[in-house]
Amino acid sequence: MSEPPTPLDDLLGQLDLETVEQDIFRGTTGRPTLVPRVFGGQVAAQALVAAGRTVPGDRLAHSLHSYFLRPGDPEVPIVYTVDRIRDGRSFATRRVVAVQHGQPIFHLSASFQTYEEGLEHQEPMPPAPDPVTLPTAAEMLPQYADHLGGPDIMELILKARGAVDLRYAEEPPFASMGEPREPKSQVWFRTNGKLADDPLLHLCLATYVSDMTLLDSVLLAHGRGGWAVGDVVGASLDHAMWFHRPFRADEWLLYDQESPTSQGGRGLARGRIFTQDGRLAVSVIQEGVVRVPRG
C-alpha cells in the first residue's frame, strides 16, 4: 500500500506544469489559504518554472521582476504563456503572463545566464540563532491560537505551510500585536523533505517561500498582527529577486528581512537569504498593499 502524498509532494506536483503546447503551460492551484485567492508565491514559482522550461539547461535564472495584477482564483488552473524575448550568447530573457478567466493575473520577466567566473564580494551574514534550537510551526503556533482567531485558523496556517519547515528567530508579528517593534525579522526555512538535484527547482522553491513572511517587517513597525488576525488588509503588488550563489532549498536558509518605509497604503520590504555557512544566496524586494481596515 503506497504512502499518502506529503504536503511537499503536493507542492512539487503543482510546480510540475503541464505542457499545453510550445511555450504554453498549465498549473494547478489548491494550496490552503486564509483568503479566497491563490498564494502569490505559488504563482511566482510556477511562472519561473514556465520560463525555465524554455531556456537551455546550462542557463539558470539570476533575476526576476514581477507584478501581481489580479487575485488568482484557487478553484481553476492557471495558464502561463512564455515569450522568448532574447537569446544571447550568455543571457536569455523571458516574459511570462499568467492568465485565468481570460485575464492576466500576474506578469513576470526573468533573466537567465550561463555560469561564469567573476569578481566576488558580499555583505556578511547577520547574527541569528541556530535553527535547530527554534520551535517548529507546529510547536509554536498553538500557543498563539487565541491571537490568530482560534484553532481552526491556526490549523489552516499549518496546512498552508506544510511543505516548508519555517521557524521564526523571534516572536512573529501576531505575538506582539499592539506593540510596535523594530521593522526587522528573521526566519529559517527549508523544505520538509529532500529535493531532486535540479537547480531550477531549488530557485523556484525559494521563490515560493520568499512571499510568505517578507511583509511581516512592515507590520512590526506598527504593532499590527497581520492578515490572519485581521487588523490589516494586504496583498503583494510586485516582487523582485536576484539569485547570487548556488543553494539548496532543502537545507537551512536564513531569511533576513526589514522594512525601510510604509506610506500611502503601501509597505516596502527587502530581504536577504543566506546559506547556513554564510553565503549570500538571494536578494529580495517586495512592495505590498498594507491597509488598516475601515471601521
Image (cartoon, rainbow, N blue to C red):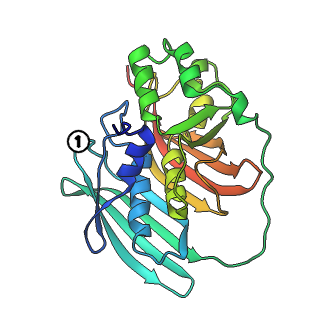
Q: Is residue 140 above or below residue 45?
A: above
Give whichever of 217, 13 is nearer the camera. 13
Camera-side residue: 293 or 105? 105
Name the residue located 40 percent from the left edge and 21 percent from the top edge: 153
Q: Residue at x 73, y 47 (%)?
A: 276
In front of the other: 160 or 146: 160
Tell me: 62 left or right of 244. Answer: left
State whether residue 2 is above or below residue 196: above
The C terminus - image quarter: top left
**Disc 1: which residue:** 75
Residue at the spot 42% in from the left edge and 22% down from the top edge: 155
- Percent x, y for residue 161? 47, 35
Residue 152 in picture, x, y percent from top left: 38, 18
Rendered location of residue 143, percent (x, y): 56, 14
Query: How far across and down, in percent of the image, does residue 147 sit?
Result: 50, 15
Residue that lies at the very extreme toward the front in this rendered image: 1
Q: Amino acid at mark 1?
A: Glu
Quarter of the image with the N terminus is top left
Location of residue 20 (image quadrant): bottom left
Q: Is residue 262 visible?
A: yes
Q: Pointer 1: residues within 10 angstroms few (<14), some, or many (20+)? A: few
Which element is circle 1 on? loop
Q: State the residue lying farthest toward the bottom.
A: 89
- Looking at the image, residue 257 sits to the left or right of residue 104; the answer is right
- Specify whether residue 292 is in view: no
- How many marks are shown on the rendered structure? 1
**Can you tell which quarter of the image residue 140 is in?**
top right
The residue lying at 28 percent from left, 75 percent from top is 22
